[in-house]
Image: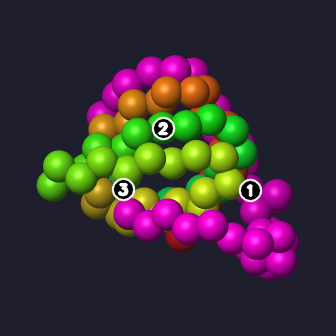
């Protein structure tokens, strides 16, 4: 899993605004990624717990890559709204 900050130029180059939007209320659930997903967090905050015990926090403005095969647990602290795409 990779979290990075990007500038407006990169946002435009990746055409993120054309990606679908996914929303989810405050909640907690396990998830497995069958495909690599790249997402850009528009709103909200979530704690992602990985199987190795590492806990990562994602927030508004983060570009996040979830690799195919990743198993994790989402704990959404503030409702999430994100653009996403599969690669």
Residue 78: x and y, percent?
A: 57, 27
Residue 26: x and y, percent?
A: 52, 21
Residue 58: x and y, percent?
A: 51, 48
Extreme residue toward the top, this view = 26
Q: Which is more toward the observer, 5 or 79?
A: 5
Is residue 25 visible from the viewing direction of this image? Answer: yes
Write down the region rendered in magenta. Answer: 1-30
Q: Nearer the viewer, mark 1 or mark 2?
A: 2
- Quadrant housing the C terminus: bottom right
Judging by the rendered image, the residue that carries numbered circle 1 is 19
Judging by the rendered image, the residue that carries numbered circle 2 is 46
N-terminal label among 3 and 2: 3
Residue 74 falls in image quadrant: top left
- Name the colour scheme: rainbow
83 over 75 or under it: above or below: below
Q: Nearer the viewer, mark 1 or mark 3?
A: 1
Label 1: state its secondary structure: loop
Q: Nearer the viewer, mark 3 or mark 2?
A: 2
Residue at position x 49%, y 63% in the image: 3
| Marks 1 and 3 in Cβ contact (< 8 Å) | no
């Amino acid at each position: 899993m990779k979290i990075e900050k990007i500038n407006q130029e990169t946002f435009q180059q990746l055409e993120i605004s054309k990606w679908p939007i996914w929303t989810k209320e405050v909640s907690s659930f396990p998830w497995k990624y069958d495909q690599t997903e790249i997402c850009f967090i528009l709103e909200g905050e979530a704690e992602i717990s990985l199987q190795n015990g590492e806990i990562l926090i994602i927030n508004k403005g983060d570009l996040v890559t979830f690799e195919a095969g990743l198993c994790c647990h989402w704990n959404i602290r503030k409702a999430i709204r994100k653009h996403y795409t599969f690669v």
